Amino acid sequence: AVFRGFSDCLLRLGDNMANYPQDLDDKRNLQTICAYWDDFHACTLTALTDCQEGATDLWEKLRRESKNLDFQGSLFELCGGGSGAAPALLPPAWPLLLAALGAALVTWLPF
């Protein structure tokens, strides 16, 4: 159930990112993308609530540690109050960060 919940969250984030309105100004564009990012984290925490004890704590730890990665243009940087400048386009490598977070979570959970 947790894998389905997490994958549903990831798929919804991907769908939102692929289909967001691109005719917005930079500020509104960034706000929209960051709302999707925040929704993804809220969805993930909800999916993990039925998991073994510590799973939500692990997710939050991974989230905090990922913020410290030196990865310019990441969603953590863009949505975490960095410089406040919104780029016109998302960096193409954002799925890499999500995959790393997901892989870390999946390897921690027992089958």
Image (spheres, rainbow, N blue to C red):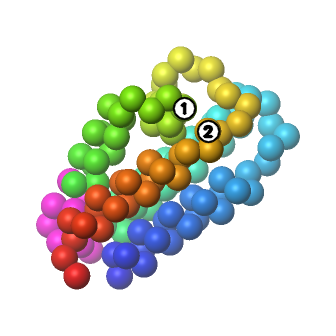
Element under disc 2: loop
Is the residue 65 above or below the residue 41 in the image?
above
Element under disc 1: loop
Question: Residue at 24% of width from left, 46% of height from top?
Answer: 61
Sequence order check, earlier mark of 2 and 1:
1
Question: Residue at 33% of width from left, 45% of height from top?
Answer: 63
Is the residue 69 above or below the residue 100 in the image?
above
Residue 91: numbered disc: 2
The residues tagged by marks 2 and 1 sit, at their Cα atoms, a distance apart of: 6 Å
Quarter of the view holding residue 102: bottom left
The type of residue carrying mark 1 is Gly
Prevailing SS of the magenta stretch:
loop
Question: Magenta stretch containing residue 104, yes or no?
Answer: no
Question: Residue at 50% of width from left, 63% of height from top?
Answer: 10
Q: Position of residue 14 (x, y in %)?
A: 60, 60
Question: Label 1 near label 2: C-beta < 8 Å?
Answer: yes
Inspect this view and state whether residue 71 appears.
yes
Residue identified by numbered label 1:
73
Q: Residues within 10 Å of mark 2 (few under 14, many from 20)?
A: few
Highlighted magenta segment, given as a residue range: 50-57
Question: Magenta stretch containing residue 51, yes or no?
Answer: yes
Q: Residues within 10 Å of mark 1 (few under 14, many from 20)?
A: some
* Quadrant location of the C terminus in the rendered image: bottom left
Is the residue 8 above or below the residue 86 in the image?
below
The type of residue carrying mark 2 is Pro
Q: Position of residue 37 (x, y in %)?
A: 52, 48
Residue 82: numbered disc: none
* Relative horizontal placement of residue 58, taking residue 94 as reference (left or right): left
